[in-house]
Image (spheres, coloured by chain):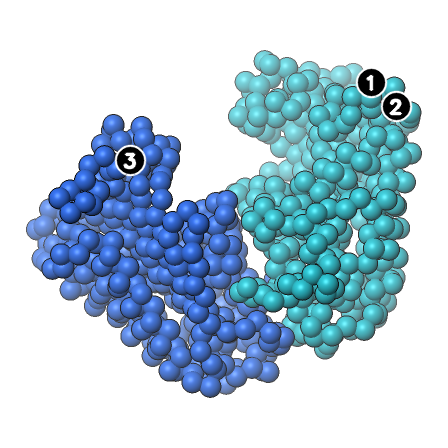
Chain colours: A cyan, B blue
Amino acid sequence: MSTKPMRQQVEEYIVELQDTIVGAFEKLDPNAGHFKRDSWIRAQGGRGESCVFPPSSSSTDTNASNATSVLEKAGVNISVVHGLLPPAAIRQMKADHSTIPTADAEKSMPFFAAGLSLVVHPRNPHAPTVHANYRYFEVTDPDEVDAKGDHKVVAWWFGGGSDLTPSYLYDDDATHFHKTLKEACDKHGSGLYAPFKKWCDEYFYIPHRSESRGIGGLFFDDLCDAPHKKLAEEVEKGTADPGRPRTPDEIFAFIKATGDAFVPSYLPILVKRAAAPSTEHERRWQLLRRGRYVEFNLVYDRGTKFGLATPGARIESILMSLPEVARWEYMSDMGEDEESREGQLLKVLKSPRAWL
Amino acid sequence: MSTKPMRQQVEEYIVELQDTIVGAFEKLDPNAGHFKRDSWIRAQGGRGESCVFPPSSSSTDTNASNATSVLEKAGVNISVVHGLLPPAAIRQMKADHSTIPTADAEKSMPFFAAGLSLVVHPRNPHAPTVHANYRYFEVTDPDEVDAKGDHKVVAWWFGGGSDLTPSYLYDDDATHFHKTLKEACDKHGSGLYAPFKKWCDEYFYIPHRSESRGIGGLFFDDLCDAPHKKLAEEVEKGTADPGRPRTPDEIFAFIKATGDAFVPSYLPILVKRAAAPSTEHERRWQLLRRGRYVEFNLVYDRGTKFGLATPGARIESILMSLPEVARWEYMSDMGEDEESREGQLLKVLKSPRAWL
């Protein structure tokens, strides 16, 4: 167990994870050039680093057949920010985090937030888009200081997950992705994968299309030492074996396991599909699916909505998740035939499957 | 003055206007084929007709250079719907429409809504996108019936407008568009164009980009016989000449003037720009601008947000406004140079201009 404050441990981990992930993509496609690294400072406190592909935006083609890079558009971002949360925000937070003292809901409280988030849109229609996020949040009491001079932590939690969005469904890929994530979960609790897989299906859902965004993965939030609304009673009571991660160190170990699982969960799929032959028809379907991705992110995604509504937020980082190109057709005929490859994807998006 | 109920007059007008507008586009590009006409019935009451281009979605190209039609994607829709508004909706409406009796805010009230809305995305990057909307709304009292058997109208209003979204700015086009709209306004009141032009600039604004969607036009809502918050005091008092349209017939005449102005305001611009030579660079900028159009429509447009949140709404009609293709680049370099054609557009989008 490290004696460093959790905020420092998390920051060190996401910096390292960003390097690992970006390095893995760069190694996969050495001719494509390095990701562009863009550091930024937040005036109100904190910093970030965006690693983006393509390194420059000067490519003009909008057509897969002209291009050779494995990735079409990708961003792997970290941000480490801190500041003061106003009383209204603290009161809202208190609903989910009862450890915040009632008296503290009347004053502004220091917060710390660190996270890595990534979205990768490959070029080949047979290679799925992937999204992942790992984050830590902390609220401290400005009036209580410990022996080392650190503010007392009055609330803390971890969140994260990753999910896969194919244009063409390969059962093998979905199974590999979910299996890798489940193995990462199972070492930290036998009751984690199932509820977080379900939560992922619920979260990445597009109500106006009655479709999931993709074939899911993991989604979790508000993980701390308090009982968690999404975990089963036997998991909470510890009668399940090996129980659930509960202390900051235990939950951080779980987060690291899911973060470390990212590369092995996704890269083998990308390697397998990136060079597959594809047609204009398949490219068109991929762009239509990217239109749905845009719809989810702009209309429903909490992080995006929060970011767009935050004055002074870094819009380019928030909207980095959007694909390079997206397409909309009125009453598209693609996917109408249930037996077609497109129709098979839609069927799974309309009724999420248990992959394992 | 017609003795027909206003709802019937409005329905007849928008049916005719749809034909006129679709006919004008079809005549402009006779080789492109007709718009597809799609009629629909609303289970809860009402009907609509969507006229869409392209007539089928089977084209696979995502690249301007392969295509020859003037339009890339267009929809000219009418809808005429009626039903019952629940008390909560009536109470909310009463804030802007004091003619609704207090007692009526406790019961469900019949409503009627008729409107035409259109969005046209031309293919050529030098030809601007256009949007227009003309609508009438009525609330009646189910318990009061006149001699003809019609319910008493307790609240009614008109709304509408049109606005232009160029990728490349041509001052001549902007001036022509605004001049045509102003002339339509001025016959019905000298104090209409200025406030409705301003309202348009305010409405079609993308806060997270600090940009207007386009170069404006007209936007108005809640036009009825009550004093209007956006009209100047001297216009309201009638000391301005010729005052303002106030009765249902007067306001309907104004709406028809703006609706009839659509074809002369836009078609000459489209004719002038549709065959201009264009480059891949210009196409790329056009697609980036279409990305902004998607951002506005999905994140801010009231009609779209209301539609997406309405169970059972016709999603394909609501999202018909989205372009065929849109593009996003991280930290795009396009438009950075203030002297470039792209930079010149951005300058106007960041500070709306008086075009007349």
Circle 3 — which element? helix
Is the C terminus of chain A in the top left, top right, bottom left or bottom right quadrant?
top right
Q: Chain of mark 2?
A: A
At horizontal 71% and vertical 42% (from top left) the residue drawn is: A201
Label 1 CA crowd tier, 10 Å (few <14, some 14–19, many 20+): few
Q: Chain of mark 1?
A: A
C-alpha gap between disc 1 and disc 2 = 8 Å
Q: Amino acid at mark 2?
A: Ala
Label 2 CA crowd tier, 10 Å (few <14, some 14–19, many 20+): some
C-alpha gap between disc 2 and disc 3 = 56 Å
- Report the residue marked by disc 1: A237
At horizontal 73% and vertical 25% (from top left) the residue drawn is: A228
C-alpha gap between disc 3 and disc 1 = 53 Å
Please indicate, yes or no, whether residue A173 appears anywhere in the rendered image. Answer: yes
| Same chain? Circles 1 and 2 | yes
Tell me if B68 is positioned left or right of B14 in this view.
right
The tag on residue A95 is: none
Q: Amino acid at mark 3?
A: Lys
Residue B263 in the image: state x and y as whole percent: 31, 73
Circle 2 — which element? loop
B349 above or below B263? Answer: above
Q: Are marks 2 and 3 in contact (CB under 8 Å)?
A: no
Is the N terminus of chain A in the top left, top right, bottom left or bottom right quadrant?
top right
Q: Are marks 1 and 2 in contact (CB under 8 Å)?
A: yes
